[in-house]
Every structure is written in C-alpha cells, then in structure tokens.
Image: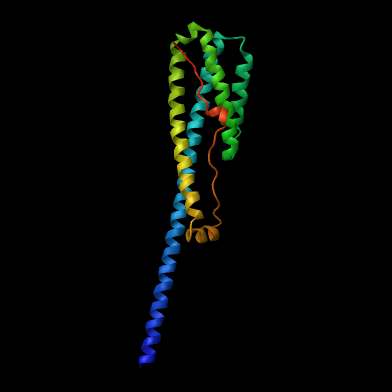
Amino acid sequence: MAKEEKKKSGLWILIAVVAVIVMWFIGTYNGLVTMNESIDGNWAQVENNLQRRYDLIPNLVSTVKGYAKHEEEVFTAVSDARAKLAGGNLSVAETAAATNEMNSALSRLLAISEAYPELKANENFMSLQDELAGTENRLAVSRKDYNDSVKTFNAKIKTIPTNIVAGIMGSTAREYFEITEAAAQNVEVNFE
C-alpha cells in the first residue's frame, strides 16, 4: 500500500510540475503576443503622424510657392520625398530613409522663408508652420514609444527562459526606427 501511495504522490507531483510548465508557457506566449501587438500599434501611430505630416506638406508647399517661384529644386525634393513615403507597405528601415529625405527637404523649404519677409508674415504660412511643428512633436513621441516597445520586446525574447517560447513562436528581433546622423542635427530656421 505504501508503494502505491508513493506512486500516486509521485504522479501528482509530476502532474503539478507539468501544469506549472504549461501555465508558464501559456503566460509567456500571451505576453509575447501582447508585446508584439503593442509594437504594431505603436508603429501604426508613427505611420499616422507621418500621414498627418504628408497631408500638411502640399499646403505648406503651395503657400511657399506663391512667394518663391524660382525655388523649383526645393519643391521637387519635397515632392519626391513625399512620393516615397506614399509608396505604401514600407519596412521600418525604408520608412526611416524616406523620412530622413523628407526632413531634409522640409528643412530647405522652411529655410526659404528667411528670404521672403512677406511670407513670414503670412497667417496661412504661420498656421501651417505651427501645425507642422506640432506634428513633428507628435511624431517624435510616437517614434520614441515605438522604439521603447521594440527595445522591451527584443530584450524579452533574448532572455532565458523566454527565448525558448520565442523560438517556438518564431519571434525575431524587431527593427528600430532610426534616423541618420544628418537628420538628427537641428536645423536653425528663424521666422522672426
């Protein structure tokens, strides 16, 4: 009888250990899925802010064009950069590269206003400038949120024992939204 009791007790211990492992696996799996969805949501917010910027640019270009008709090279650069972002289904790296081009083109566009005092005084231009600045701030925040969630996820899938579940799921490290050194430099544009 004692031998049978030990067998039952050993079986219950085995069942308990298996149950704990299964519950840990399910919890870890669900946690990784949640983190992955968070990254996708944060990326959607980056894209939303890029779209807002994309929608503001034609109005800004039109306003500046009215004052600076001979600055065609800058208008073309803005248009080309905008078209790249509109291409759709870009990877994080491709979006970052297109965003860097857009930042450069916008900096040149805004710098034009220095040569046109009447443009700087234009209410429409000033309103568009304020909206663009607000959009850039929102974009910076959403880019930071995205990169923070990628950092957390990438660290999680590389740690033991979560890396076992991540390997089974096929989870791989996600890409950061990085900008180039040139885009990281502040552009001095003075509208006063």
Q: Residue furthest top?
A: 118
| Residue 173, x across and y down, in percent | 54, 49
Residue at the spot 51% in from the left edge and 30% down from the top edge? 51
Q: For this rendering, which residue is in front, 112 or 48?
A: 112
Which quadrant of the figure contains the C terminus? top left
| Residue 132, x across and y down, in percent | 46, 23
Colour mode of the rendering: rainbow
| Residue 172, x across and y down, in percent | 55, 52
Taking 92 as reference, is 172 above or below it? Answer: below
- Kindly tell me whether residue 129 is visible in this rendering: yes
Lateral position of residue 72 relative to residue 3, left or right: right
- Kindly tell me whether residue 89 is visible in this rendering: no
Give the quadrant of residue 94.
top right
Taking 112 as reference, is 18 above or below it? Answer: below
Q: For this rendering, which residue is in front, 176 or 95?
A: 176
Residue at the spot 44% in from the left edge and 51% down from the top edge? 34
Lateral position of residue 136 relative to residue 180, left or right: left
Taking 6 as reference, is 154 above or below it? Answer: above
Which quadrant of the figure contains the N terminus? bottom left
Lateral position of residue 138 relative to residue 171, left or right: left
Give the quadrant of residue 69.
top right
| Residue 135, x across and y down, in percent | 45, 27
| Number of marks in picture | 0
Taking 8 as reference, is 126 above or below it? Answer: above
